[in-house]
Every structure is written in structure tokens, then in C-alpha cells.
Amino acid sequence: MNNLIHIEDYFIKLHRSFGISELSYQNRRLELDESNMKQLVFASEAFDEEFENLVDHCSMIYDELQKGFSLKIRKDVNNNYLVNVI
């Protein structure tokens, strides 16, 4: 359970830092939405340092689910972040 909270916190931090709200991880390959890529151009050095961490977190989820997934981060009406793994 703590591991899930840690992963959720990580993706919320990533969203706040880099604006990444959606990603897909299929066949051990990370895919980011094109709109996210445009935002990352301005934070490229900081994101480069974080990229390996992102792949590691995606790999942990992939290993747990034993299949590819999509992840979406949204805010609810009370401004709380929700992390959905599909």
C-alpha cells in the first residue's frame, strides 16, 4: 500500500513540475502526449535528469500489472489530484 502511495505522489510531483498529465507505457516503451512534449522543451535539462526515474516508476507499475498501461492525472472539484491507471 505504501508503494502505491509513493507512486501516486511521484506522478503528482511530475505533473506539477513538468505538466505531464498523460502517458502510456506499452511493451516497455514510454510514450508521452505531443502536448506534453511541447511543454518539456522549456524544461529539457531538468526533465533529462528525471527521465530515468520516470522509466523506473513506469517499469514498477508494468511489473505489477503484467501488462501495458495508460496513466492520467486529473484534478477533482476540490483541487485534489487523482491518478488513474488504465
Image (spheres, helix red, strand yellow):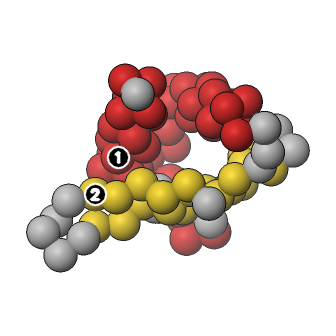
Picture disc at residue 12: 1
The residue located at (77%, 49%) in the rendering is: 68
- SS class, disc 1: helix
Task: Write the residue at 42% across / 60% down.
Answer: 73
Whether 73 is drawn above or below 57: the answer is below
Rendering coords of residue 54 (x, y %) = 57, 34
The disc, 2 or 1, on the residue closer to the chain's N-terminal end is: 1
Where residue 80 appears, x then y in whole percent?
A: 20, 59
Cβ atoms at labels 2 and 1 below 8 Å apart: yes
In the image, 19: left or right of 50?
Answer: left
Circle 1 packing at 10 Å, graded few (<14), some (14-19), many (20+), is: many
Give the structural element (helix, strand or loop) at label 2. strand
Q: In the visual, does 86 lie left or right of 29?
A: left
Q: Quadrant of the C terminus?
A: bottom right
**What type is the residue that disc 2 sits on?**
Tyr
Q: Which mark is residue 81?
A: 2
In this view, the residue in front, 26 or 30, is 26
